[in-house]
Image (spheres, rainbow, N blue to C red):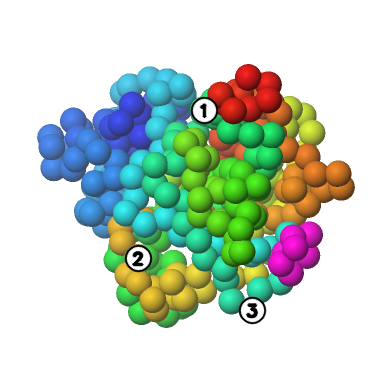
């Protein structure tokens, strides 16, 4: 099952590009607000399984919002692919470095992002969405707490991120528009071999990053076990799981996102998201 946010309303996607409005089709049993829907996730999934063939509205791609527009908690993991850890100034971690992207940075899948500077970098990432409260969850039980998967871009302003006596990961990665996700949440049963998905991003036609999620150092179940040992993971929370090698800041010379660039981020079985870039008021190109 694929769940999208169509102009703020939870919408189940049909096989032919059509959609089913969840609140209307369920006569209000389930809410229109996609974020609120995760509170009734198990019931909703059961209901949605009986709605085959009922999708009746056209999906306007431009109207898609984030499948989790305002999660209470956003976890993000740094240095979670060995080749990316090796290209970073930090090296391979013994424990997953955790930061957040503040929820106001979340947007839908197809957006124009305002560049605050000439130092904004790309990071394609698998995003896991929590469907059941997870507290002290064992790795073996972790996938059952996941509602599904989606694509995220962990856009990162490297000067802010790396300034000061200790890196400011959360702040440098939370400018407006820096957490596009989508195009839809895809449940695990609809993603073949969901522990080994090809992921990539490209600028125009140039491939910038290419990897597989099976290369994650700390895989989704271990992340859920480790995080839920500290704080409960709540329905609708999301985890940005980390990025493979090929980020711009690690290149020699460093490269960053250009004004008018078109960044396409893709994960096997989950579709793609696409960002374009415009100069903000403090950008030299403005
Ligand atoms: Zn990242």
Q: Position of residue 143 (x, y in %)?
A: 44, 67
Q: Residue at x 24, y 46 (%)?
A: 36
Q: Nearer the viewer, residue 31 or 46?
A: 31
How crowded pointer 3 is (Cα within 10 Å; few <14, some 14-19, many 20+) is rated as few
Q: Residue at x 38, y 76 (%)?
A: 230
Q: Tell me the element at label 2.
A: loop
* Residue corresponding to mark 1: 111
* Residue corresponding to mark 3: 94
* Residue corresponding to mark 2: 233
Looking at the image, the residue that sits furthest to the front is 165
Q: Position of residue 130 (x, y in %)?
A: 37, 59
- Nearer-N-terminus badge (3/2): 3
Against 92, is 122 above or below? above
* Image quadrant occupied by the C terminus: top right
Magenta span of residues = 85-91
- The answer to whether 281 appears left or right of 201 in the picture is left
């Amino acid at each position: 099952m694929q769940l999208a946010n169509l102009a703020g309303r939870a919408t189940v996607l049909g096989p032919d590009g059509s959609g089913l409005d969840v609140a209307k089709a369920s006569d209000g049993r389930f809410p229109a607000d996609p974020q609120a829907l995760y509170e009734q996730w198990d019931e909703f999934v059961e209901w949605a399984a009986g709605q085959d063939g009922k999708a009746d509205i056209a999906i306007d791609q431009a109207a898609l919002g984030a499948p989790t527009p305002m999660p209470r908690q956003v976890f993000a993991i740094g240095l979670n692919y060995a080749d990316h850890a090796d290209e970073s100034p930090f090296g391979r971690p013994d424990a997953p470095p955790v930061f957040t992207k503040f929820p106001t940075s979340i947007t839908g899948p197809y957006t124009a992002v305002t560049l605050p500077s000439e130092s904004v970098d790309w990071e394609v990432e698998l995003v896991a969405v929590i469907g059941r409260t997870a507290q002290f969850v064992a790795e073996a039980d972790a996938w059952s707490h996941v509602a599904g998967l989606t694509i995220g871009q962990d856009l990162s302003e490297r000067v802010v991120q790396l300034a000061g006596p200790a890196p400011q990961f959360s702040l440098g990665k939370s400018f407006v528009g820096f957490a596009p996700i989508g195009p839809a949440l895809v449940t695990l049963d609809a993603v073949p071999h969901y522990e080994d998905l090809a992921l990539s991003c490209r600028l125009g036609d140039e491939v910038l990053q290419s990897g597989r999620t099976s290369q994650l150092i700390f895989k989704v179940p271990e992340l859920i076990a480790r995080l839920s040992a500290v704080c409960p993971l709540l329905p609708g929370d999301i985890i940005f799981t980390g990025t493979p090698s090929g980020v711009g800041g690690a290149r020699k010379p460093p490269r960053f996102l250009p004004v008018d660039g078109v960044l396409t981020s893709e994960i096997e079985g989950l579709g793609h998201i696409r960002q374009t870039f415009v100069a903000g008021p403090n950008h030299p190109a403005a």
